[in-house]
Image (cartoon, helix red, strand yellow):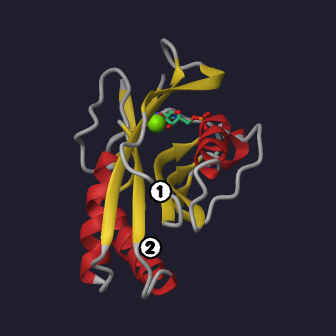
Amino acid sequence: MAETILFSREQIKTRVNKLAQEIANDYAGKDLVLISILRGAFIVTADLLRALYEAGLKDVDVEFMRVSSYESGEQTTKEPKVILDLTTDIANKHVLIVEDIIDTGYTLAFLKKHLEKRKPASLKILAFLDKKEKREVEVPVDYTGFIIKGSPWVEGYGLDGGEFGRGRPDVAEKVTS
Ligand code: IMP
Ligand code: MG
């Protein structure tokens, strides 16, 4: 199957560094906890964490959560389940959820509600990719890497799907024909 590269590794690097600058400014003097949503977001989280360090934000904690929104195949269920929850208390901490991609919005809407119950000092959302046109529920996204037009299935830089791996350094779209 043919593929189109949507975002190259250079474009991604530049964008992640830019976001890190912005986040480092916004959280200067504050302790930040990144909550990386497995599995897709582990790659962007790792790059972001190191870019934050280089941008001067060094007191950054990382936590992981995993939720399922796709039971099998590529269909969204509207009630994601928590498969892996936090192991530390986020009360009174500044929390930034790091997600690989926002599509319908159900996953992040659920996570936001779930984490707000734990009374963080603040709670913001970073989505590396945003399929804006696919949104079914409103979710405030505070930091966006790239917006994707239409509704292609994309892979790479942590995102998976069938024949392309999470490990590819760019983001590609499968093209049928
Ligand atoms: P939402 O609940 O519809 O916003 O779904 C978000 C989740 O769907 C993401 O965390 C991804 O795991 C997955 N997802 C949505 N679109 C894609 C895609 O194009 N490639 C890989 N994963 C995707
Ligand atoms: Mg995901």
Residue 82 visible, this orientation: yes
Residue kind at label 2, given as amino acid type: Leu
Q: Position of residue 159 (x, y in %)?
A: 37, 38
Q: What element carries label 2?
A: helix
Label count reads 2
Front: mark 2 or 1: 1
Q: Name the residue under label 1.
A: 90
Q: Is mark 1 on a helix, strand or loop?
A: loop
Residue drawn at (29%, 50%) of the image: 43
Residue drawn at (59%, 67%) of the image: 122
Residues under numbered marks 2 and 1 in contact, where contact means CB atoms less than 8 Å apart? no
Residue 48 visible, this orientation: no
Residue drawn at (48%, 12%) of the image: 72
Within 10 Å of disc 2 (Cα), the crowding (few <14, some 14-19, many 20+) is many
Within 10 Å of disc 1 (Cα), the crowding (few <14, some 14-19, many 20+) is some
Q: Position of residue 62 (x, y in %)?
A: 32, 57
Residue drawn at (77%, 37%) of the image: 136
Q: Name the residue under label 2.
A: 19
Nearer-the-camera pick, 62 or 69: 62
Distance from Cα at disc 2 to Cα at disc 1: 23 Å
Is 63 above or below relative to 17? above
